[in-house]
Image (cartoon, grey):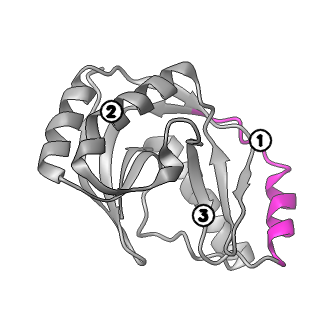
């Protein structure tokens, strides 16, 4: 699986990693681990033509200025193994960037994940997935419900990451113009 994302660095990335550490330490949630990069995704597919994607995303990044984004609260994608995430507020600017990326890369992708389609995309930062035990979920929600997750993020790049069951790797990164 591959995804077009914005990587979170500096203090933004550190806050996410601290949440991952807290979940691992206090709740035994290890589905997110040190071999992962704090990020939020715009587009996900089984595979992209990486050479062409790098050229296209590089051009788009050169025309994109750094912009703020904001998280708000916590959310849960329900399924057999729930996913806990921080919602990223879908502003007009973020929706435009998402639409530009989808239009630019869809023809380069195979096996596009439908959850990233324009009309249903929920930008988010995953903080737990893969091994959240249902009996522990209310405890996690209770603790995290007391935290202030109204974070201001600095969005500075596009990247493509490749994920296997055990690890993520950055295939390439394109920083914004300013």
Asked if the residue at tag 2 contacts the one at tag 1, i.e. Cβ–Cβ closer than 8 Å, the answer is: no
Q: Earlier in the sequence, mark 1 or mark 2?
A: 2
Q: Position of residue 45 (x, y in %)?
A: 36, 56
Q: Position of residue 7 (x, y in %)?
A: 40, 45
Residue drawn at the location 84% of the way across and 78% of the way down: 135
Q: Which residues are magenta?
A: 135-152
Q: Nearer the viewer, residue 10 or 41?
A: 41
Q: Earlier in the sequence, mark 3 or mark 2?
A: 3
From what the image shows, is residue 117 above or below residue 83? above
**Circle 3 — which element?**
helix
- Foreground mark, 3 or 2? 2
The residue pinned by badge 3 equals: 20
- Give how far apart the Cα atoms at labels 3 and 2 are: 33 Å
From what the image shows, is residue 58 above or below residue 34? above
> In this rendering, would 130 be left or right of 169?
right
From what the image shows, is residue 128 above or below residue 175? below
Query: Which quarter of the rendering shows the C terminus?
Result: top left
The residue pinned by badge 2 equals: 103
Q: What is the number of the mark on residue 148?
A: 1
Q: Is residue 93 magenta?
A: no
**Circle 1 — which element?**
loop
Query: Which quarter of the rendering shows the N terminus?
Result: bottom left
Q: Nearer the viewer, residue 136 or 50?
A: 50
Number of residue marks: 3
- Give how far apart the Cα atoms at labels 3 and 1 are: 16 Å
Residue drawn at the location 49% of the way across and 42% of the way down: 117
> In this rendering, would 144 be left or right of 114?
right
């Amino acid at each position: 699986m591959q995804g077009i994302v914005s990587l979170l660095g500096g203090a933004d990335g550190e806050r996410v990693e601290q949440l991952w550490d807290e979940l691992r330490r206090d709740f035994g949630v290890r589905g997110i681990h040190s071999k992962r990069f704090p990020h939020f995704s715009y587009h996900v597919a089984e595979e992209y033509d990486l050479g062409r994607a790098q050229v296209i995303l590089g051009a788009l990044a050169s025309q994109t200025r750094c912009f703020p984004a904001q998280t708000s609260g916590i959310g849960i994608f329900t399924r057999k193994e729930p996913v806990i995430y921080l919602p990223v507020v879908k502003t007009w600017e973020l929706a435009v960037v998402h639409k530009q990326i989808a239009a630019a890369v869809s023809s380069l992708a195979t096996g596009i994940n439908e959850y990233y389609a324009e009309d249903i995309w929920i930008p988010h930062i995953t903080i737990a997935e893969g091994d959240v035990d249902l009996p522990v979920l209310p405890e996690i929600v209770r603790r995290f419900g007391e935290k202030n997750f109204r974070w201001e993020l600095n969005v500075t790049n596009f990247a493509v990451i490749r994920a296997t069951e055990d690890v993520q790797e950055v295939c390439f990164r394109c920083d914004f113009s300013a």
